[in-house]
Each structure stands twice: as structure tokens, then as C-alpha cells.
Image (cartoon, rainbow, N blue to C red):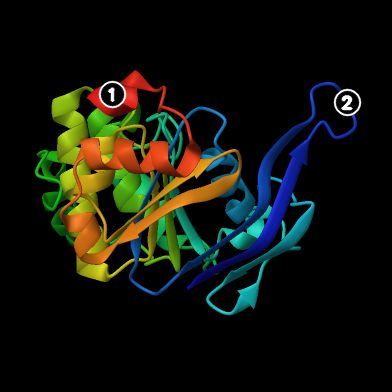
Amino acid sequence: MLEIRNVTKVFNPGTVNEKVALDNFSLNLEEGDFVTVIGGNGAGKSTMMNAIAGVWQVDAGQIIIDGVDVTGLPEYKRAAFLGRVFQDPMTGTAATMGIEENLALAKRRGKKRSLRSGITKKEREEYRELLKILGLGLEDRLTTKVGLLSGGQRQALTLLMATLQKPKLLLLDEHTAALDPKTAAKVLETTEYIVNKDRLTTLMITHNMKDAIAHGNRLIMLMDGKIILDIKGEEKKNLTVSDLLMKFEQASGEEFANDKAILG
């Protein structure tokens, strides 16, 4: 479903601030893979995500989604393949519009628009059933302005909107980092449910080692724009934070320095 072939991305080339963010980077995801991504600051996690989304063009290599080479496509054209949820709960929704209006926008994205306005009774019932999945009581607040929701409610709604049209690839960019632990756990639970229900191929960046271990069928760790660990199957199921730290030290030759990631 996703092939990243020998991708390189350098920022500020030829200057004192030159930074090789992705270094001949390759990654393959099979359909239905749920891959968690972890690494220290500057490891290349967000650069990888933005390269897939087309936020900027890569300097070398190819990006292929479901057999389609999207390397030269601009961000708005790649959006047809992708669902994305960002770290900031304020991104991805229209604050001044109601919950049902936001869902309608997501549902109709990429489709031909007609002169007919408003949301039908059938659509409203569909949205109500979808919102019940979240377990947040939003199904009874369809006309509530999204700007009035809490960060967790808004992030859960954004997740629902990003997966409404079953994207080829779901990108979750530290989507629980700005939430309190209890709300983050609820959003992750909802994420797991939606991803498994629709067998969505998913890349989830997280700053939390415990979450990286607990979710998904595969874990990759980045350092200096390269994958230094790729753990899957039974090895991942039996993994602990201590195991992961030891593997990191063996692969990198240094200690993992992000206390927030270790402590969760």
C-alpha cells in the first residue's frame, strides 16, 4: 500500500544549517499494516510524514501509494489517497461550523458538488451512528459548533472525519500529544477500533514508547533520517520499554535521550 524508495530530503543545503532529514530512506507497508513510529527530536519522523503527504518535494527517491507514483504530485492531489490527523486538535476541523457540517464536508470531499444545500435526514442518521463509536455523547450535539468542543472531543471528531472515506493510507502525526493522559487513552482506543474495523493501512507517530508498543502490528524507530529498528510479529507483542531501550542502544551505540518518550 505504501512504498518509500530511497528518499532523501535535505534542508538548507550548502549552508551551515544544512540538515539531512531523510537519508536514502526506504519503507514498505502492506495493506492493513498499523505501524507505530518513534524516535528522538530531529530523527526524521515528521519529515517522513510530510514527504508522504506532499507538503514538500523530496530531493531524490520515489513515493508510491497503492501502486500510484505520487512523487511529483502536489499536496492537494495526494489528499485523495490520504487521511491525516495532526498534533494540534484545532487543525482539521472548521471551528465555526457544527459537528454535522464538518462531517458532511469530510463525507463529500472530492465529490462533485450540486446546488442542493443542507444535510439530509439520512445523512444526519448516518453521522449520529458514526459519532456513537466515539462514546463521547456527540451524537446528541450534531449542531454544536466544533470550536466549543474540548481538545479530546475535537481530536476524536477529526479522526472520524479523516477515516470517513476509507483512505488508502492514514497518517497520525502525534495526534494524542496535546491531550491529557485519560483523553489520549480514549482517542487511542478509538483509533485502534476504527483502524481494525476498516483494516486501514496506518502510520502513527508517537512520542510515547508505551503507546508505540501497545498499538499496531509493527514498530519502527528512526534516527538521523534512517530506520534503525523494525520490530513486528511475536517480537513486538512481547516487547517492553526496557527491551526497546536496549535494542536502541545496540543499534545506535548511544542512550535514548528523550525522557518524555520513556516515561510516557
The quadrant in which residue 250 appears is top left
Alpha carbon separation for disc pair 2 and 1: 45 Å
Farthest residue, direction bottom: 67
Residue 47 visible to an observer of this rendering: yes
Mark 2 — residue? 15
The quadrant in which residue 187 appears is top left
The quadrant in which residue 46 appears is top right
Q: From the top left corner, tell me how far across and down residue 70 is, in percent.
A: 67, 67
Q: From the top left corner, tell me how far across and down residue 164 is, in percent.
A: 34, 60
For mark 1, does the 10 Å Cα neighbourhood hold few (<14), some (14 to 19), or many (20 or more) residues?
few
For mark 2, does the 10 Å Cα neighbourhood hold few (<14), some (14 to 19), or many (20 or more) residues?
few
- Whichever of labels 2 and 1 marks the residue nearer the N terminus, that label is 2
Marking on residue 148: 1
Q: Nearer the viewer, residue 198 or 223?
A: 223
Question: Which dot, 2 or 1, sits closer to the camera?
Answer: 2
Q: From the top left corner, tell me how far across and down residue 232 is, in percent.
A: 30, 62
Q: Nearer the viewer, residue 233 or 84?
A: 233
Say left or right for 203 vs 139: right
Callout 1 amino acid: Leu
The C terminus lies in which quarter of the figure? top left
Identify the residue at image location x=18%, y=25%.
181
Instruction: Using the image, determine if residue 200 lies above or below residue 210.
Output: below
Say what secondary structure mark 2 lies in: loop
